[in-house]
Amino acid sequence: GQNIDQPTEMTATEGAIVQINCTYQTSGFNGLFWYQQHAGEAPTFLSYNVLDGLEEKGRFSSFLSRSKGYSYLLLKELQMKDSASYLCAVGVPGANNLFFGTGTRLTVIP
Amino acid sequence: KAGVTQTPRYLIKTRGQQVTLSCSPISGHRSVSWYQQTPGQGLQFLFEYFSETQRNKGNFPGRFSGRQFSNSRSEMNVSTLELGDSALYLCASSPSRGNTEAFFGQGTRLTVV
């Protein structure tokens, strides 16, 4: 089976940096995705990692270590609008679907 | 370019009824996947359609079914509804198969009473 773990909730202060971790154990690996989902809205794509290392995209960065089954999403210069759920998802070979963690609800406070 | 469109947005049904949800993918996208999202379980994969054929199926009972039309629009059907089927049903489209970026619709919020 597939197992993807991430913290349920996190709180951080506006302007700060927050790191959301994700660990996975899957039957194969074909990339790790991060999505952002605001309440009542569709998940939107944030990042995709298939090789080890850090991918930076503006205020958001995502890191992957395949040997450790570990990824994190780093959000810098937090803004109130970053309050949302962050979903970690893994693709596996032979399937076109993603396996999702339960999501991390991030609350940004003033 | 229009995004993924799901209809209806909200639905209330009674136990035992059946329901059909619709998804129109982004123009040119041929792969459509369906997910169920509940607070405790997160997003769980239901099935994927590509070129009018179901290519992959998640671990859901046979009451959950779907189909895809020649224009790539997809429908999913749930028969004999149970209270536990209350969830947000999300549709995602991709240009092709192979774990490319998936674009999600707003979802259909189904409440079974």
Image: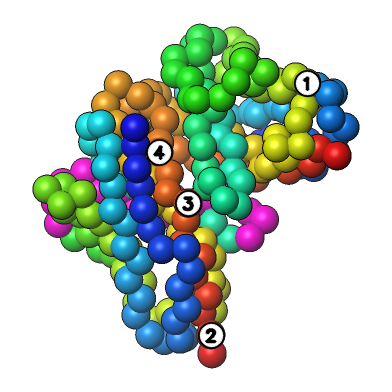
Residue under label 1, please give it.
B80
User: Real-space Cα distance between discs 2 and 4?
Assistant: 30 Å
Residue linked to disc 2: A109
**Chain identifier of the residue bearing label 3 in the image:** A
Discs 1/4, front: 1
Mark 1 neighbour class, 10 Å CA radius: few under 14, some 14 to 19, many 20 or more: few
**Which residues make up the magenta segment?**
A39-53
Looking at the picture, does residue B26 appear above or below residue A49? above
Give the label, 2 or 1, closer to the camera: 1
Counting residues from the N terminus, which is met first, the one under dot 3 or under dot 2?
A: 3
Q: In the rendered image, which residue does mark 3 sit on?
A: A102
Q: Which mark, by number, is residue A99? A: 4
Q: Nearer the viewer, residue B61 or A95?
A: B61
Residue A45 among those drawn in magenta: yes
Quadrant position of residue B64 = top right
Under tag 1, what secondary structure?
loop
From this view, report whether residue B77 is shown above or below residue A54: above
